[in-house]
Image (cartoon, rainbow, N blue to C red):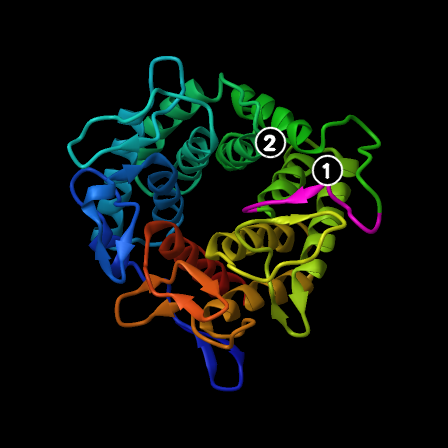
Amino acid sequence: MTVTLGPMVTTPAPPFAHLVRLSDDTGLFEHARHGIARRAHGYCTDDVARGLVVTAREPNPSGVVAGLAERYLGFLTHAQDADGAFHNRLGYDRRWQDAPGLGDWWGRGLWGLGTAVAHSPYAWIRQESLVAFTLGASRRSPSPHAMAFAGLGAAEVLRARPGDPSARALLSDAALAVIGATPPYPLKGPDWFWPGDRLTYANAALPEVVMAAGRHLGDAALLDVGLAMLTWLYGIQTRGDRLSVVPVDGWERGGPRPRHDQQPIEVAALADAFATAAEITGDPAWEEGIRRCAGWFLGENDAGVPMWDPATGGGYDGLTPGGPNLNQGAESTLALVATFQHARRWT
């Protein structure tokens, strides 16, 4: 199946070949030099969790994709300690290089597990994912981003289990961690409708979890704030008819707007949030946002160049002033797959 973007531009089916290339019987390698995995850099829970998100939500997965989901789930359950925290970095020698913690990897771990609870076609994967999610959902992180990722996992669990107390409590706490207030949820103002003074990375995950909390917890004011945050973020990351996303070093309120290096993770976070907004509101404007996210990978970006390699199925690691960084690591490839999944469904 392909999705028309514009004249002679279509979105291919989500490619999994490079994820297979980056995966072994342990997990998902973090880095690549061009299309070849760099084994010396090992694995990280951040990427494996995102791998579980895209493989678990793939409809009618092939045997290969289903096998990846099982492998990634096994990695996450091995990374989790008895108190619900997660290790992040595993060396190629199969030794953990850090202590368990509650950083972004904890949040993404819960996001992956929650997605498997909601979408895996296999009962045993849903059951094991729920056990691990419930353990992790007992913890809280001081990081708003980590809480946002965890809250997205909680929202997925609530799709399948609307009354789940752990998921409801975590989603509520995640939304408050993002906006830092109770009603009427004041933010910075119309020129900077954001809870902080800096845009950083995967920014759209923040309004997405606020929207999800408004929806699943029945809080219309919270939903409105999340939609307004996303509308503002979409506007400031659009130039003409294409996306121009906040680069890896971020953007400080009142400071100059940098253009590079743009990262695929920012585009994928927008696609995720647009899909949530489209599902909640039915507004076709959000579907157009998804189209623009897919278009960014296909060359509708500031450099006018594709940000993936159709021969390998890998996503390029960043858009620089000189064009794409041709390395095809896990994060970028997962961003590509996730965005194309949304384009297939919504546009």
**In 3D space, how far apart are the residues under numbered discs 2 and 1 (Cα atoms)?**
10 Å
Residue 114 % position (x, y): 44, 34
Q: Earlier in the sequence, mark 2 or mark 1?
A: 2
Q: Relative to residue 29, is residue 285 depicted above or below?
A: below
Residue 49 % position (x, y): 37, 38
Amino acid at dot 1: Pro
Q: Which stretch is magenta?
A: 190-202
Res 124 visible: no
Instruction: Look at the image and say whether residue 126 sits in the magenta stretch.
Output: no
Residue 251 % position (x, y): 65, 50
Name the residue that disc number 1 marks: 195
Q: At 53% across and 37% down in the image, what residue appears? A: 152
Q: Which numbered tag is attached to residue 144?
A: 2
Res 299 visible: yes
Specify the farthest residue to the top: 83
Label 2 crowding class (10 Å Cα cut-off): few <14, some 14-19, many 20+?
many
